[in-house]
Image: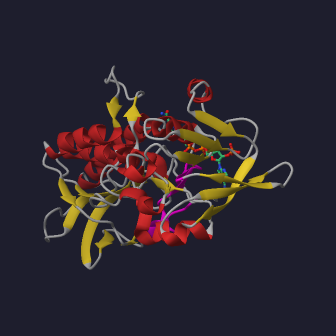
Amino acid sequence: MTQAHSTPHRRSLVIIGSGPAGYTAALYTARASLHPLVIDGGPGLGQTMQGQGGQLTITSEVENYPGFPEGIMGPELMARMREQVARFGVEFVEDLATRVDLAERPFKVWVRDTEYQADVLILAMGASARWLGLDAEKPVWEGGLGGAGVSACATCDGPMPVFRNKELVVVGGGDTAAEEALYLTHFASHVYVVHRRDALRASQVMQKRLLSHPKVTVLWNKVVADIHDVAEKVVTGVTLRDTVTGETSRRECAGVFMAIGHKPNSDIVAGQVELDANGYVVTHNEVRTSVRGVFACGDLQDHVYRQAITAAGSGCMAAIQAERMLAAEAGGSTPEW
Ligand code: NDP
């Protein structure tokens, strides 16, 4: 049934996404001569985190990816993964997948008006930053980003001149908040971490670094209720609400960086593969979705580990399972799903 290359846009295997999961799936399937096509999200999509390289392109130093004893910058790690994948002749479509039809095989994937067909599909679209839902964040979603002083990416926007030697706010109490706050200390005069509880969620090592840093203060039991002057394309401060007393206060700052978790980028497959209550793709046997022939890997389906190394690992699993499925079908059998 595999008819790779019989039409210009027909492939045995299409991969959507180009984070560690997508690139690893591409690496393994390319080495298995499946000629994967990777729809990589396109360059410069920054804050949507669905662009080339995914979330690691907006991270600073990665210290926990094996093989890099001195650590490596996230963007460099992803550039090296892409280079490694390209060496095996993987073809890239440098844009976002806009629509899929998974009703029958071959599956159909559209990038704007161009249709691609695939016998097997690997979903690796990852996850994107969450926002508080304030009106003041809207200009950011509409494309204005860091210039307005509100951001979900300290690595992208922190070095901007507007934040230099200024007081900044980071929202959240997890590892991302800790990492972003510490990164911002390189530029800011002081960083205030606004956390809604009285205990951090971040790992012990990150907590220790954060709480001992002279340029960081954690504002406990507080939420950001408003951000001021975004309409004038400048941040001058935030209104904080105490989650215990309900009292409000104002803190001056030149920028607000959201670090309150992520949302899986599963919108284009919603209603076609099973999703859990939070929108993560549900998988069985590690990487198989509810649709035969559609695999999912990385942060799109993993809400537990969410690490580059686990994403890469599940990309590898998806690739090997896809390869075995195609080989079995080529031999005339219908493998279990
Ligand atoms: P998390 O889900 O771990 O943390 C989100 C934080 O935001 C929590 O402290 C949460 O508060 C807070 N929060 C969520 N919603 C709101 C809201 N509406 N208003 C105010 N605060 C809110 O997300 P992270 O992005 O920090 O981390 C995700 C995963 O990635 C984790 O497993 C983490 O360990 C991992 N990670 C690892 C890194 C590394 O190893 N170098 C670096 C970065 C992330 P509350 O605590 O009250 O729920």
Residue located 29% across and 76% down the image: 112
Say which of 169 and 103 sits in front: 169
Q: Is residue 232 above or below residue 38?
A: below
Q: Within the magenta stretch, is there residue 212?
A: no
Say which of 314 and 183 sits in front: 183
Q: Is residue 328 above or below residue 101?
A: above
Residue located 56% across and 28% down the image: 206
Image quadrant where one finds the N terminus = bottom left
Q: Residue furthest bottom?
A: 113
* Residue 101 located left or right of residue 139: left
Residue located 61% across and 28% down the image: 207
* Quarter holding ligand 1: top right
Residue 157 drawn at (x, y percent): 40, 51
* Residue 298 located left or right of residue 81: right
Q: Is residue 294 above or below residue 60?
A: below
The range drawn in magenta is 254-276
Say which of 50 and 245 sits in front: 245
Residue located 49% across and 44% down the image: 285
Q: Within the magenta stretch, is there residue 255?
A: yes
Q: Is residue 203 above or below residue 275?
A: above
